[in-house]
Amino acid sequence: MTRSWTALPIIVIAGLPVWTAPSAPVLLVEAAAGLFCVLGILRHALTPVVAGGALATIGYALALWSGAAGVDIVGAAVFGIALLVLLDLSDGARRWHGADIAAEVVRAQLAYWLGRTAIIIAAVALLSLCSAVLAGLVPAGGRAIVAGRGVLIPFAAALCAGIVRGTRRGA
């Protein structure tokens, strides 16, 4: 696997926030994010790539906060998918560096990545549709309650998964 495939997600995660709100702070944060990501790719290290991804996320949040435009669902989904693809590709390049990989293994890994991306796109589309319907049905005062429950459900699921995983390791 060549490192050149990681260039596209780096460009997307660094460029989308700058495109959303072109300001000097956003540009500086995204430049640092891009440098961290490139450093991690060149050194076959995942930690700088993760740090670059975190900086890119902070830059995107800064761009959304400072920009006049509202939250763009498609932009957020593209940013998240690009970040996920960057982490997957850089981890794959790190693990497979110097190894001879069979074509079937590469095809299976690509099929897994593309399948997961398709599931994410379908989930974003479904959640966007559900939120549009709920926005019309729920009165303005109740939207905060619905949003709070929407945040608590994945948190509770992650907590439950951590507890179940912890009990399996301890047994």
Image: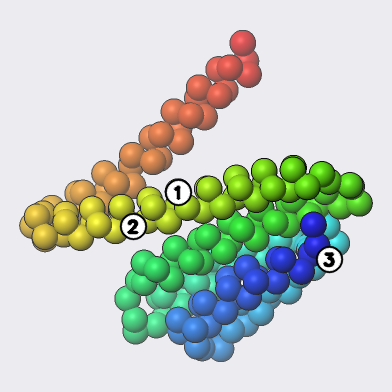
Q: Residues within 10 Å of mark 2 (few under 14, many from 20)?
A: some
Image location (x, y in percent) of residue 169 = 63, 19
Marks 2/3: CA–CA distance = 35 Å
Residue nearest the observer in this picture, 131 or 31: 131
Q: How is the image coloured?
A: rainbow
Whether pointer 3 and pointer 1 mark residues with C-beta atoms closer than 8 Å, the reply is no
Residue for point 63% across, 75% down? 11
Whole-number angstrom distance, CA of label 2 to CA of label 1: 10 Å
- Which comes before the other along the chain, label 3 or label 1? 3
The percent coordinates of residue 48 (x first, y second) are: 74, 61
Would you say residue 136 is visible in this rendering?
A: yes
Which residue reaches farthest front? Answer: 104
Kind of residue at badge 1: Ile
Nearer-N-terminus badge (2/1): 1
Give the residue at the far top of this rendering. 171
Which of the marked residues, 2 or 3, is nearer the chain's N terminus? 3
Tell me where residue 76 appears, x and y as whole percent.
43, 66
Give the structural element (helix, strand or loop) at label 1: helix
Kindly identify the amino acid type of the residue bearing the numbered disc 3: Leu
Q: Position of residue 70 (x, y in %)?
A: 32, 76
Q: Which residue was labeled with disc 1?
A: 119
Label 2, secondary structure: give it. helix
Determine whether 96 is above or below 157 in the image: below
Instruction: Tally the marks.
Output: 3
| Mark 3 vs mark 1, CA separation in Å | 30 Å
Q: Is residue 26 visible?
A: no
Q: Secondary structure beneath disc 3?
A: helix
Q: Quadrant of residue 47?
A: bottom right
Q: Which residue is mark 3?
A: 42
The image's mark for residue 125 is 2
Q: Residue lying farthest right? A: 98
- Labels 2, 3: front one: 2
